[in-house]
Image (tube, coloured by chain):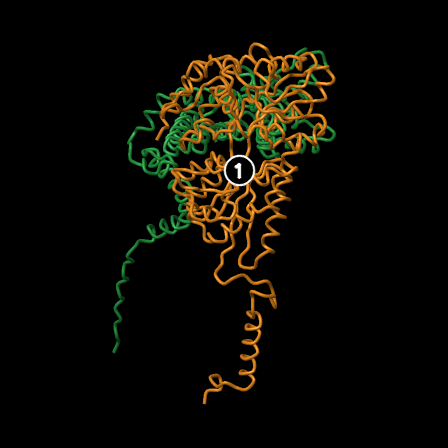
Chain colours: A orange, B green
Amino acid sequence: MDEGASLSRRKLLHALGATGVIAAADLAWWDEPLIFPRRAWGAEPVRFQWSVPEPTRIALMNSLAERFNQSQKDFAVAIEYVPQAQARQKLISAITGGSPPDLCQAWDNWIGQFNGMGAVEDITARAKAWKYYADVAPTAWQTVTINDKIISLPLSVTLDGIYYRTDRLKELGLKAPTPDWTWDEFLALAKAFTKADKNQYGFGMRGSGTWALLYPSEYCYANGAEVLKDGKVAINSQEAIDALEWYLDLALKHKVTPPSAATDGFVEIVETFGRGVTSMYQHNSGSSGQQKKNVGAENFATLPVPIGPAKKRASFWFSETLTMFKGAKNKEGAWQFMSFMLDDEPSQKYCSTLGLLPARKSLLDRPEFAGDPALAGFVQSFPIGIVSPYLAYPGWGGRIDSDGVPLIQQAMLGKISAKDCLDRFAEILKKEMS
Amino acid sequence: MTTLTLARPRTRPLISWRVRKLLIGYSYLVPAAFCLLATVVVPIILAIRMSLYADVLYKPQDYRFIGLGNYLRLIEDPVFWLSLRNSVVWVFGSVILQFVFGFAAALLLQQAFRGRALVRTLTLLPWIIPGVVVGLIWEWLYQPNYGVINDLLIRLGLMSERIAWLSSPDLAMAAVVFTNVWRGIPFFAIMLLAGLQAVPDELYEAAHVDGAGVFSRFWHITLPLLRPIIVVATATRIIWTFNYADLIFVMTGGGPANATQITSSYTLLQAYSSLDFGYAAALSVVLLVVMLAFTWAYLRVTKGVEETE
């Protein structure tokens, strides 16, 4: 008899012992794990790409993801941090290469393109069955709805408003502006703040990045113009040209902007305000937290954008979204994490830490948001908030950066007129209407 | 009885020894050739193919063969021509100044002085720092409102008003070229210093005995002997700079108003902002052709490296 093939008593005991260890490890994994925390069989971790502009977000997201991971044992959320400047490119490369993450944090002006690439999961059914569906502001839903399909959850919303230095107002003995201020009052204040010989300017105009074109577009709306009217591009209407001329004159004629305005981006407009070079700038609530550190909460306040000659004003509404990809390996897990992020506590923690506004109305009414003077201008802007008209076509977002911003820079430098700028931009938009 | 054993005719090998030797030699090249094929040749072929298609990522329904459509669009694109012109200024402005100052630095570092080893190490610093970090540092230095450069110049009384170095279309290119020169000087300095150290001292001594002055010695000994290094270093650096968009991307993003937009940064913009990969591929192919033509012409004009050896 072959000794090697026989089952000795010793071997049998070894085999039984090993089986016992494996069985013990598998015992009731849904309760207390015996050997190490177990995940549900086959449940993939949720890969979540998160773009990081600054360290606060990393700490915040780590704590929120950890809390979520501890709240259930079926799967884990693994965050992949990407610098904000490369986030969109990374996602595009990942989609093109066929390996996008399960879930990402993205701005609504990106997801139109991702959706056009056929990469985004339709979450309409899940969103409509979700307990907070009716609590999310309708405009927030509009920003993430394409062709009647909901493709993201709006995590936070942003509206543009004006930051101004209250300490400098007192120092110069100026009257504080009111929420219903006009273009003339805005200009008068910008002039009063400007002391070029002391390197002090009234308004930190933005010349770099997507918003270099979006901000003047909002002034066009205040003068009665629209980007898209009756399905046709109307951004080069006379009202829009007049509004852009007025806006450009802040730099060219009145010189109430720093000389670097043509290339000043987000960092510069926030920094120059924080360092006292400028006394007003336009941005969303996202920089309010930073200004509390830079100049102190008591030394600045916010207002809605001023009312234009047409007795109108508009603030473009953007959403920071949580977007699931079609290729997600754990869609149920991704959805669970998305909806967790919009639960009361995580959503409030996220928005209040970063100075953002929650998309859910019941949270927005809480004193942390409605009662904060640094956010007052943005909360007051909700009635004038409109979905950015540049979300109408997926190709427009990219064209703003590649063609629109260089055009507005040329106009800011006086190289081309407001009319030339808008005529050329309108032609570019027309070509991308498909 | 004697037995005769007939010699068996040797069978002729199927492949001659000469051919076999040749094949063995080539077989050693196979791994490297395969790597080159996979990482260089195949991507180039794919890029050429991509440039013949309408390939806008967010419009997959419009994906189709359009032949030379992207190239025709490129001819009519004023920003492309502007970027090509900017590229020439960026490349030659940077490389010429890097070469001149790098050569001067190499000649200085060749001299014997106290602390030479430390100075040689410090000279390398700008080259060691990653390009993106260099861009960020200089962007802050140039910052008109709180940057060191404006502050220093005002304190020294050299100017009264703050200058927006990177926001003025007339100054932005000069400012980024200056930064690139600062970064690239060590490359030439080290390359040329290595060459200088290989020049035999006897040549200089003989020339000195013959009455040759400093300039004559430099012109007739140093320059000719350094020629192979100069040719290789400048050609490499030109190609490198032509494709190098990091600094511009960080410092100006191609602005203001495309004043610093070079072809490689424009390609990046088309690919990742407009998601127009077909057009971006056409731009890349043109970039490749320009660089191939330039390299061929440069090596022809300088008569290559071999002839001097």
Q: Amino acid at mark 1?
A: Glu
Left or right side of A384 for B110: right
Tell me where residue B146 sits by quadrant.
Answer: top right
Q: Nearer the viewer, residue A37 or B30?
A: A37
SS at circle 1 = strand
x then y, percent, for residue A42:
48, 61
Residue drawn at x 58%, y 54% is A69
Q: Which residue is mark 1?
A: A320
Q: Nearer the viewer, residue A112 or A222?
A: A222
How many C-alpha atoms fall within 10 Å of the one at disc 1: few (<14), some, or many (≥20)?
many
Please tell me whether residue A288 is drawn above or below residue A253 in the rendered image: below
Please tell me whether residue A415 is drawn above or below residue A121 in the rendered image: above
Tell me where residue B81 sits by quadrant.
Answer: top left
Q: Quadrant of the N terminus of chain B?
A: bottom left
Left or right side of B106 for A234: left
Residue at the far bottom in the pictured view: A1
Left or right side of B302 for B201: right
Q: Nearer the viewer, residue B263 or B93?
A: B263
x then y, percent, for residue A162:
60, 24
Residue drawn at x 59%, y 35% is B130
Q: Nearer the viewer, residue A131 or A298?
A: A131
x then y, percent, for residue A429:
39, 25
Number of numbered discs visible in the structure rendering:
1
x then y, percent, for residue B225:
54, 27
The answer, for residue A159, to whether it is visible in the render is yes
Label 1 resides on the chain identified as A
